[in-house]
Image (cartoon, helix red, strand yellow):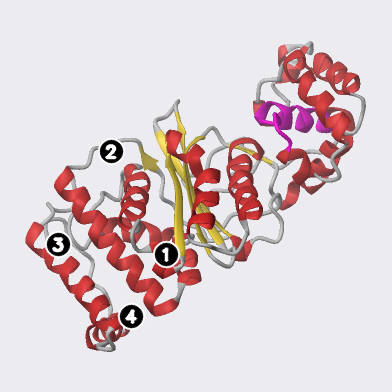
Amino acid sequence: MRTGIANLPLHGHHCPRWLFDRMVRLSAAIVEGVVEEFGPRELLRRMSDPFWFQALGCVVGFDWHSSGLTTVLCGAIKQGMVQRQRDLGVFFAGGKAMTSRKTPLEIETYTEKYGLPDHVSELQYASRMAAKVDSAAVQDGYQIYHHFFIFTGDGSWAVVQQGMNRDNGWARRYHWLSDNISDYVEEPHAAVCGNRGRDVLNMVSRESRAARDVSVFLARERPEKTVTELKKIAAQPAEKLLQLPGAHPVPQAGRIEKTLRRLYDLSPLNFESLLATEGVGPATIRAFALVGEVVYGVRASYSDPARYSFAHGGKDGHPYPVDRKVYDRSINMLETAIRRARTGNRDKLDALRRLASLEKGLAVPKIIRGDR
């Protein structure tokens, strides 16, 4: 798992129209340049890299310290690639709030519209499981409100999603990459960006393997048994409840009994199929974790899975205001380089590559506030 701190305060979401229009053009030009040079799967890899993603957001002019970087950047990329994604072979679905719920339909629509190989069911499942893991199996206090799904014709995919903590007003970003996943429910993330919290129920940690096994066992037991144990736990004196894992509230047995009965009827074979079951959410997973520890002595992990360059300034003037002329020159240069590359003239793209190689060998001076 890639690691890095990028805790994001929930402010600065408003983006002036003139800046967003330029973000659309510049982000699309950069994305197109990456795909033209390295292929669609390299774009997936870079989008799943929190450092590259954060840098891209800063390059196109968003503030590094705002959670809006995620939502606005993804929206700009999606809008900018509407007419280009078919030619490039990489497709963009989902987004913020209600738009995220359109992801399964957009996957199906793109596949039919562009005649892509039929990976619809696998891609839809990947989208659903990424959201399910970060909303139910990782209980860190952040509610998912943004889900951006990128995929290619061969069925490869990446996810950038973000959650909000209503109590402290901060956001957390989750990155996924299909090439990295051997198991949806054990260490599946490419990265989780945010400050570490305490008492985070992490059922996809390697250390939670036994707890996942116990959860499957409990799901195949008669629901009355789990309900009875939950009621016993809830009835314990307060001083004993304080010792329960993670100090999470005990789920109300009556509210999850219907889900327990559905699981009993389905008899899931493993934790992934348990988690994928409709109706299984944070309360059900937490109930299994509590009963697993209290009754069977199997403790789940409570370790938080959480583990970035301005080129044109930031929209709020940090570290300096956006220079529209410089911004427009950057867009025109990239768009011209891509157009020429398509006709066989790669001088500009080759020059950019040489510049990037040269830059890697130089010591980058520390930027002092106010410097440009």
The residue positioned 34% from the left and 69% from the top of the image is 32
Mark 3 vs mark 4: which is more N-terminal?
A: 3
Q: Which residue is mark 1?
A: 86
Label 1 – label 3 distance at C-alpha: 27 Å
Q: Which residue is mark 3?
A: 327
Image marks 4 and 1: residues in contact by CB distance under 8 Å: no
Mark 1 vs mark 2: which is more N-terminal?
A: 2
Q: Which residue is mark 2?
A: 13
Which amino acid does the dot numbered 3 rest on?
Tyr
Mark 1 vs mark 3: which is more N-terminal?
A: 1
Which amino acid does the dot numbered 1 rest on?
Arg
Give how far across and how far down residue 286 sits, in percent: 71, 30
Magenta residue check for 114: no
Q: Residues within 10 Å of mark 4 (few under 14, many from 20)?
A: few
Image marks 2 and 3: residues in contact by CB distance under 8 Å: no
Magenta residue check for 292: yes
Give how far across and how far down residue 161 sits, in percent: 48, 46
The extreme left residue here reads 325
Which amino acid does the dot numbered 2 rest on?
His
Select label 3 or label 4 by which is in front.
3
Tell me the SS state at disc 2.
loop
Q: Residues within 10 Å of mark 2 (few under 14, many from 20)?
A: some
Bounds of the magenta segment = 277-293
Select label 4 or label 1 by which is in front.
1
Mark 4 vs mark 1: which is more N-terminal?
A: 1
Quadrant of the image containing the N terminus? bottom right
Q: Is residue 179 above or below residue 291?
A: below
Quadrant of the image containing the C terminus? bottom left
Q: Which residue is mark 4?
A: 360
Q: Is residue 336 above or below residue 92?
A: below
Q: Residues within 10 Å of mark 1 (few under 14, many from 20)?
A: some
Label 3 – label 4 distance at C-alpha: 23 Å
